[in-house]
Image (cartoon, helix red, strand yellow):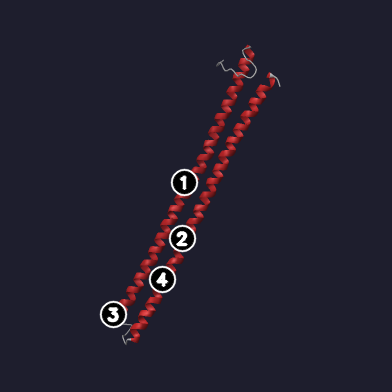
């Protein structure tokens, strides 16, 4: 292989560097996009789980109300008046408060997961941008190296295996 092959080797090396850099950035972006999608799916699951938990709490509250009414009625207390009504309302209010707390907690967890998904989206964008900048830099470096070789070869100052860039 002679001196004439050097520019082709430089061009090939530069092309591989550019393609490798862009490919790596695309792979990083794809991974970040996958993580963003997973975080969003987890957020939806958290919301759904919170709704299920809230409904179980409400059901348990209704069961507790029914047991209280049954106990009061068995004692001969009028379940539609006075203290029994207050007890029933208190049980219902407590159950609803617990259910709403479960929903709020699930929503908070979902919001954190959605924020993480947004961070992954930014990471994907940054990975692509970085790879394009690095690829452009590799392209410019390759061009500079090829230009330096050409200049040195034209002036007769080049030696095989050594690339001189004298800024000409």
Mark number displayed over residue 119? 1
Q: Residues within 10 Å of mark 2 (few under 14, many from 20)?
A: many
What is the CA distance from the residue labelled 1 to the residue labelled 4?
A: 36 Å
**82 above or below 17?**
below
Q: Is residue 167 left or right of residue 66?
A: right
State the residue at coordinates (56%, 39%).
25
Residue contact at pointers 2 and 3, CB within 8 angstroms: no
Disc 2 element: helix
Q: For mark 4, what is the residue?
A: 58
* SS class, disc 4: helix
The answer to whether residue 115 is above or below residue 54 is above
Quarter location, residue 108: bottom left
Label 1 near label 2: C-beta < 8 Å? no
Which residue is located at x 47 percent, y 63 percent? Answer: 49
Residue bearing mark 3? 83
Tell me the distance, in whole angstroms, between the alpha carbons under discs 1 and 3.
54 Å
Q: Which residue is mark 2?
A: 47
Work out which residue is located at the far left of the displayed protein and give it.
82
Q: Quadrant of residue 67?
A: bottom left
Earlier residue among tags 2 and 3: 2
Q: Residues within 10 Å of mark 3 (few under 14, many from 20)?
A: few
Is disc 1 placed on a helix, strand or loop?
helix
In which quadrant of the rendered view does residue 160 lie? Answer: top right
Task: Give the mark nearest the N terminus, 1 or 4.
Answer: 4
- The answer to whether the residues at label 1 and label 3 have Cβ atoms under 8 Å apart is no
For disc 1, the neighbor class at 10 Å (few under 14, some 14 to 19, many from 20) is some
Quadrant housing the N terminus: top right
Q: Distance from label 4 to label 3 (Cα)?
A: 22 Å
Mark closest to the chain's N terminus, 4 or 2: 2
Q: Is residue 147 above or below residue 69?
A: above
Q: Residue at left 51%, top 56%? A: 41
């Amino acid at each position: 292989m002679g001196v004439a092959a050097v520019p082709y080797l430089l061009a090939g090396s530069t092309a591989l560097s550019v393609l490798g850099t862009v490919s790596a950035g695309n792979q990083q972006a794809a991974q970040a996009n996958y993580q963003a999608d997973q975080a969003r799916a987890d957020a939806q699951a958290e919301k759904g789980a919170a709704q299920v938990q809230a409904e179980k709490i409400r059901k348990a509250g209704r069961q507790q109300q029914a047991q209280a009414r049954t106990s009061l009625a068995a004692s001969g207390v009028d379940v539609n008046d006075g203290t029994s009504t207050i007890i029933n309302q208190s049980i219902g209010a407590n159950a609803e408060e617990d259910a709403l707390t479960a929903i709020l907690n699930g929503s908070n967890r979902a919001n954190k997961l959605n924020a993480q998904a947004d961070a992954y989206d930014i990471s994907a964008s940054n990975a692509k941008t970085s790879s394009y900048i690095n690829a452009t830099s590799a392209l410019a470096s390759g061009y500079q190296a090829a230009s330096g070789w050409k200049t040195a070869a034209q002036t007769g100052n080049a030696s095989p295996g050594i690339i001189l860039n004298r800024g000409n």
